[in-house]
Amino acid sequence: MIELINVEKYFKKPIRGKGVWGMFKTLFSRKHTLVKAVDGVSFTVGDGEAVGYIGANGAGKSTTIKMMSGILTPTRGEILIDGKRPYKSRERNAVLKTIGVVFGQKTQLWYDLPLTETYDLLRYIYDVPEADYKRRIGELTELLDMKPFMDAPVRTLSLGQRMRADLAAAMLHNPKTLFLDEPTIGLDVLVKRKLIEAINELKNQYHTTLILTTHAMSDIELLCDRVIVLDAGKILFDGSLEKVRHMFGDKRNVTIQTPAPIDVSAVVDKYEIENVSTDGDGLLTTFTIDAQKLKIDVLLDVLLKSYKVVDIKLSETGIEQVVEKIYADVKSDDDAAIEAEGGAQA
């Protein structure tokens, strides 16, 4: 079980003067401001649970992951992984043997070594019995389709290959909990899908507790059944994925390119379109819909029959839009509570 109790994290930010001289003086100055990256975060994650930990850039997601994995120490509050604090030296090793971590923009692999030698080193680091190691590496190699590049140096791997290799490294010691921080960042659609499928299979097969940060709602939908939304270091929402869908709907964007500006009134009047926007010259038109109310194939059929379409692009709701919607709902509830309290006092 993972427990976070009123966790806060501050960082010191040097106060920099103007110009080159001001930058130079900053090197010898002790003046700084405190930036609160995580602000009173509390939640509990049960064994085998899969949680999407989402928010806009700078919300504090990665900082929280680094504290849970023992890389950073909380300024205030407490983090417990099965009753142990990962940032305490006496408890750290016991925690590290039960967790795996994958950072999308960093790797734990040795750059110049072949994968086979890297995994051999990790086996000794995590003290994995030889029989368990052979069985485990065989399963991971097959599941993640790594056989073609197992003898290749890490520096020669593509991004997709490296991400699969990093996932295998994180799962090599059969961790009870897996932290994934932007694991699909920069991957193309096919590689991303294969990686997500592999993570899902590993999670289900080994009943692994999963904490995932990502900017792709599709990753959350495929892997998680609970969502925690963070904004400016504070939790705005903690609930089921179904509740997020109910609050926000299944928003999709359908963008069409036409050789000339178009009149969209006929389509908008007839179908349930939530928003329509165009670019500067009117040649790109984006229709935002709730896919639970209007099927994409129905809209595409109408658009292709109504207009001369040069190109089509489909996109899903971004994390930022989800956070904005939840933030707006939370603020609306707070404003209503303040009004009600004011009326009661009057």
Image (cartoon, helix red, strand yellow):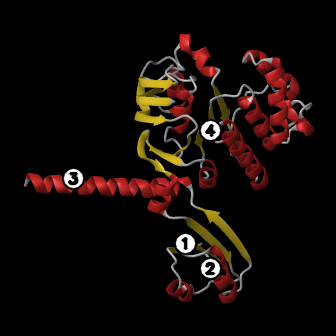
Would you identify the image quadrant in which residue 328 lies?
Answer: bottom left
Helix, strand or loop at mark 3: helix
Report the residue marked by disc 4. Answer: 181
Marks 2 and 4 sit apart, C-alpha to C-alpha, by 35 Å
Q: Is residue 260 left or right of residue 251?
A: right
Within 10 Å of disc 1 (Cα), the crowding (few <14, some 14-19, many 20+) is many
- Image marks 3 and 2: residues in contact by CB distance under 8 Å: no
- Density class for disc 3 (Cα within 10 Å; few <14, some 14-19, many ≥20) is few
Instruction: Say which residue label 2 marks.
Output: 299
Q: CA distance from mark 2 to mark 1?
A: 9 Å
Q: Amino acid at mark 3?
A: Ile
Q: Which quadrant holds residue 75? A: top left
Q: Nearer the viewer, residue 26 or 68?
A: 68
Point out the tag, 3 or 4, that comes first from the N-terminus. 4
Between discs 2 and 1, the one toward the N terminus: 1
* Residue at x 55%, y 72% (from the top left corner): 289
Residue 10: horizontal and vertical position, in percent? 44, 27
Q: Whole-Å distance between the Cαs marked 3 and 4?
A: 37 Å
Kind of residue indicated by mark 4: Asp
